[in-house]
Image (cartoon, grey):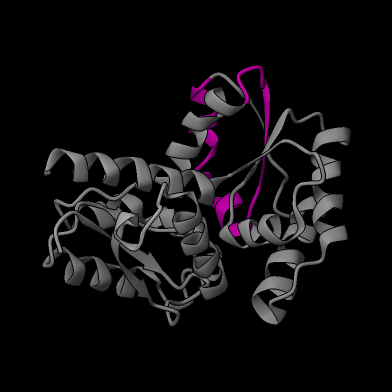
Amino acid sequence: MENFFTIIGGMGTEATETFIHILNEKTPATKDQDYLDYILVNNATIPDRTAYILDHSKPNPFIPLSEDIKQQSKLGPDFFAIPCNTAHYFYDDLQALTDVPILHMPLETVKEIKVKYPNAKKVGLIATQGTLHDGIYDQPIIDAGYELVKPAEDDIVAKKTMELIYDDIKEKNEVDADLYHEILNEMVNNRGCDVVILGCTELSVAEERAGSAGFNVLDAQSVLAEHCIDLELKNRAANK
C-alpha cells in the first residue's frame, strides 16, 4: 500500500470499533476505492492505562505500546493515530521512538473548539481518572484562552463517569443513556460549561449510541477521525 496510516487500537476494543465506524462513515466515498488505506492494530491486551497512571506498580502500558510503534514504523505509514485519550500520557516517549508523526488527539480536539463552538468560554472535560490525573488536556485548554472546568478525581461527576466507562461500557458493552445525560446536564447546567469535551473513547461509544440530548459536546475520537481523513486525502491527492 501507498499512503496508509496505522491505528494503534484495542484500548478498548469497542471504542476502537466506534472509531473505525466514525472514520469510514465520515470518509467521502461513493465506491470501495474511495475509502482510506490503513492498518488497524487492535492490541486488546495492553494493560489498563488509568490503573498504571494512578499506581506505577501496575503493569506498564508503555511496553506493548512501544513495541507496536516500533513494529509498525518499519512498514512506513504516513502517520499514527491512537484512539485512546489516556494513552497520550505516553505521547512524548512514544514519539521519541519513531520519525513517523503520531497525531495528538487532545491537542487536535482543543484546536477544534474554536471551529465548532466559536463563542465558547468555559470548556468542560469528562474523562477517565487517569486523564483527569495526568492533565493532558489542562494546559492546551488554558493556553487556548478557555476556562477549564474539570471534576476532581473524587468528584461525583468523575465517579459517575468512571461508572459509565468501566462498569457499563467496558464490562457490559452497554450504555446507560440516563447516566450519560445526567453527567452532561451537571457539567452544562450546573457547572456552566459552554461545551464538554468527551475525553475518553468509551464516552465516544456513549455518544454514538445515546446521543448528547442537545448538550454541546466535542467528541475527541470524532476529531481524530476527521483529522486522519483530512491528512490522508491530502497525501493521496499529492501522490496522484
* 140 part of magenta stretch: yes
In this rendering, would 67 be left or right of 111? left
Based on the displayed image, in which of its 4 quarters is residue 8 positioned?
Answer: bottom left
Q: Position of residue 151 (x, y in %)?
A: 73, 44
Q: x, y (%) of residue 77?
A: 18, 58
Q: Does the magenta-highlighted stretch encompass residue 107? A: no
- Note whether residue 55 is visible: no
Which residue lies at the image location 49% right of the left edge and 70% below the top edge?
11
Q: Is residue 66 visible?
A: yes
Mark count: 0
Q: Residue at x 13, y 67 (%)?
A: 75
The one of 132 and 67 positioned closer to us in this rendering: 67
Residue at screen point 29% across, 50% down: 102
Looking at the rendering, the stretch of residues picked out in magenta corresponds to: 117-144
Q: Measuring from the top left, give residue 228's x and y in whole percent.
A: 36, 48
Q: Give the quarter of the figure containing the N terminus.
A: bottom left
> Which residue occupies the foreground of this view, 84 or 211?
211
Task: Identify whether 45 is placed above or below 77.
Answer: below
Q: Name the quadrant containing residue 71.
A: bottom left
Farthest-out residue, front: 31
Q: From the viewer's perspective, is residue 96 above or below residue 122?
A: below
In this picture, residue 73 sits left or right of residue 87: left
Q: Report x, y in % for residue 31.
A: 36, 58
Indicate the quadrant containing the C terminus: top left, top right, bottom left or bottom right. top left
Q: Is residue 166 above or below residue 37?
A: below
Identify which residue is drawn at 40% across, 71% down. Answer: 61
